[in-house]
Image (spheres, rainbow, N blue to C red):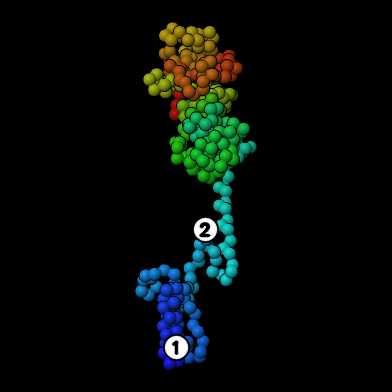
Amino acid sequence: MRTTGLKRSLAALAVFAVVSGCTAHAVDAEGKKPPVRIDGSAGSPPGARGKDDGKPASPSKGGDGTSGSTGAGKGEERPAAEPAEPAKVLWSRGDRGDDVRRAQARLHQVAWLITPPTGTYDARTVAAVKGFQGKRGLPRTGDLDAVTWQRLRRMTHEPVAWELYPYGGQPAARPDPRCMKGRVLCVSKTSRTLRWMIDGRTVSEMDVRFGSQYTPTREGVFSVSFKSRHHVSTIYHTSMPYAMFFSGGQAVHYSSDFAARGYYGASHGCVNVRDEGKVAALFAQVRTGDKVVVYW
């Protein structure tokens, strides 16, 4: 009768084990109980392994999405992810040079820098970079870092010479060989400069601008035909002070429009000079018959 009672107790225990989701394991040969796997999910796929299947479990993730263990040892917490390093700063306030000038020209293209390029990373450039960065969700540092520079480059084109020097100041190009003898007004369309030369020596230099594509300044070798200190154009009725004519109605002369607007404007074919003091001194030295060379 005791045997019957024991069987009933074992049967009840088996039912309890099934209902509670536990898996009962037999005692091994040494009398030790192997680990018990708690499986709270019904319908696990055949062959599915639990925590104690002999392989390390994958690190569990907490509510913030971070792993609870590094795998280096039990109980260790995964260190917080290090913040990304800030982008490398290429140029910042106080820097000078051609690279800064090109960056300023690009900022001017997208209307963040209204003033012309100067080649000096000044307060206006800092403000322009901050505005550009803020508009695009970048840190508003005012420094032109690698990330900001790449964004700016994608939105702009490589600046041409007149964009880098919209108000003049570009270094003069090498004189044309035809300028190396005699008294010559040596005019370079490449650098947009005029050299006043005597026997290969540069006496003075000045910024100049030329006609538009519809009224281009002629190129070649000419000579000064006549001079007119207070000239007024009979065609356009505009003032042409210190005019030195070299090809028909085309002349080297001072232009107040050039002084005010820089290379954002153009002449009707004349060689405009923006510095009145320099062109006045030039006018006093140039003689009728002096050579004029206009070249690229």
* Residue 2 image offset from top left, x and y in percent: 45, 92
Residue nearest the viewer, comparing 138 with 183:
138
Mark 2: secondary structure: loop
Secondary element under disc 1, as helix, strand or loop, is: helix
What residue is rendered at 62% in x and 32% in y? 123
Q: CA distance from mark 2 to mark 1?
A: 48 Å
One can see residue 186 in this view: no
**Quadrant where the N terminus lies?**
bottom left
x 49%, y 43%: residue? 150
Q: First in sequence, mark 2 or 1: give its number.
A: 1
- The answer to whether one can see residue 146 in this image is yes
* Residue 31 x, y percent position in the rendering: 51, 89
Give the residue displayed 55% in from the left and 47% down from the top: 87
Q: Is residue 60 left or right of residue 277?
A: left
Residue beneath label 2, please? 63
Percent x, y of residue 167? 53, 25
Label 1 neighbour load within 10 Å: few <14, some 14-19, many 20+: few
Q: Is residue 221 shown above or below 88?
A: above
Residue at 58% from the left image edge and 45% from the top image edge: 89
Q: Dot 1 corresponds to which residue?
A: 6
Q: Mark 2 or 1, which is nearer the eye?
A: 1
Residue 117 quadrant? top right
Q: Residue furthest front?
A: 1
